[in-house]
């Protein structure tokens, strides 16, 4: 084989790699789904606290996370069935999201079973988990913008400790909107743009 | 790499098969349409090359149904990865001959 043919082979490989090298973010819809799940959790917590059933708040979070997990599993398996290509990035993102929210699910089950109801822990725990999740997504997607919502959640995780308990739910709306809902919609528009460019 | 081992795998050497393997190296799995679109080859030609690669143990081909429509999913095997890497090493050696001396 001469070097010219070898060069042609290398060019062909490069061309194929370039074609498949798309940083498609399929996580946008799941991102938003979990944003709304957290919103439902906040509303349920606020309602339960105002009705004097604060000890059931962790159960409400368990319910929200369980429903969110089931919906994500159904969505993911349906998407995989009709998706033309499955990348390693898709699997990493899916596993990461499931891992984080499964941890929250277990925590929300374990605390009431231990008969401890650390309601004040909900804010920092949510902030830390969401912040870490979004920070890792920012690195995986190579999208620096996501570092801002991650930072918002981290700041919230600490800042919420200075807020009176009755305002925690309300305070959580800020990182939820700016750290979840808006980035989620931006992620979806990025995904659509990349698909169009492909 | 010695000159004796500079033998390019004939199963990979064909441009379409090389293109298929290059694509499959970067993804977990891809369906027939994706491979057809990205390699720019015809269905019949692609099908023939996929069969050759499957018979050679370089890829797995799974036929499923989605909404009553047939779907062919392809993925590279560990053996396929190993042989693709060897192929790349051979190409590199050909392009940089001083290293083979």
Image (cartoon, rainbow, N blue to C red):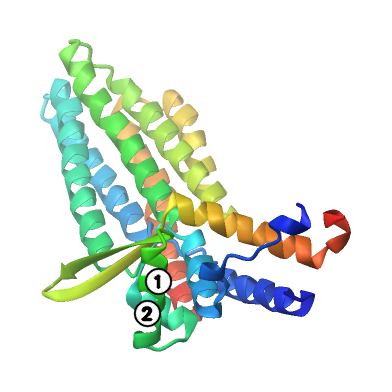
Q: Quadrant of residue B35?
A: bottom left
* Residue A136 in sight: yes
* Residue A22 in sight: no
Label 1 chain ID: B
Residue located 18% across and 75% down the image: B70
Residue located 41% across and 76% down the image: B49
x, y percentage for residue B30? 37, 67
Residue located 71% across and 78% down the image: A5
| Circles 2, 1 touching at the beta carbon (< 8 Å) | yes
- In the depicted view, which residue is nearer to us: A46 or B2? B2
Q: Which mark is residue B52?
A: 1
Q: Secondary structure under badge 2?
A: helix
Q: Which mark is residue A133?
A: none
Q: In the rendered image, which quarter contains the N terminus of chain A?
A: bottom right
Label 2 chain ID: B
Q: Quadrant of residue B45?
A: bottom left
**Residue at label 2?**
B48
- In the depicted view, which residue is nearer to us: A32 or B69? B69
A9 is higher (above) or lower (below) than B8: below
x, y percentage for residue A68? 21, 45
- In the depicted view, which residue is nearer to us: A43 or B71? B71
Disc 1 crowd, CA 10 A, few/some/many (<14, 14-19, 20+): some
Relative to A76, B89 lies left or right: right
- The residues bearing labels 2 and 1 have C-alpha atoms spaced at a distance of 6 Å
x, y percentage for residue B82? 54, 51
Relative to A159, A116 lies left or right: left
The total of numbered circles placed on residues is 2
Residue closest to the far front: B4
Disc 2 crowd, CA 10 A, few/some/many (<14, 14-19, 20+): few
x, y percentage for residue B13? 58, 72
Q: Secondary structure under badge 1?
A: helix
């Amino acid at each position: 084989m001469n070097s010219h043919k070898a060069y042609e082979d290398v060019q062909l490989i490069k061309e194929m790699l370039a074609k498949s090298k798309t940083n498609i973010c399929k996580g946008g819809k799941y991102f938003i789904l979990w944003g709304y799940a957290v919103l439902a959790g906040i509303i349920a917590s606020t309602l339960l606290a105002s009705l004097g059933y604060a000890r059931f708040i962790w159960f409400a979070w368990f319910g929200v996370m369980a429903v969110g997990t089931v919906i994500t599993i159904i969505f993911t398996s349906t998407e995989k069935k009709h998706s033309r290509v499955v990348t390693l990035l898709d699997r990493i993102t899916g596993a990461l999201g499931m891992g984080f929210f499964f941890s929250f699910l277990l925590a929300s089950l374990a605390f009431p079973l231990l008969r401890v109801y650390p309601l004040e822990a909900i804010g920092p725990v949510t902030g830390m988990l969401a912040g870490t999740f979004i920070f890792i997504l920012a690195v995986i997607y190579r999208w620096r913008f996501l570092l801002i919502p991650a930072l918002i959640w981290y700041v919230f995780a600490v800042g919420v400790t200075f807020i009176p308990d009755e305002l925690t739910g309300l305070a959580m709306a800020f990182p939820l909107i700016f750290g979840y809902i808006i980035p989620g919609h931006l992620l979806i528009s990025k995904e659509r743009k990349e698909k169009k460019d492909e | 790499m010695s000159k004796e081992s500079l033998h390019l795998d004939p199963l990979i050497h064909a441009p379409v098969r090389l293109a298929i393997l290059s694509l499959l190296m970067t993804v977990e799995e891809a369906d027939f349409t994706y491979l057809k679109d990205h390699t720019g080859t015809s269905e019949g030609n692609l099908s023939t090359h996929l069969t050759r690669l499957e018979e050679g143990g370089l890829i797995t081909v799974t036929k499923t149904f989605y909404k009553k429509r047939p779907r062919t999913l392809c993925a590279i095997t560990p053996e396929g990865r190993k042989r693709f890497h060897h192929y790349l090493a051979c190409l590199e050696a050909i392009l940089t001959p001083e290293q083979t001396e």
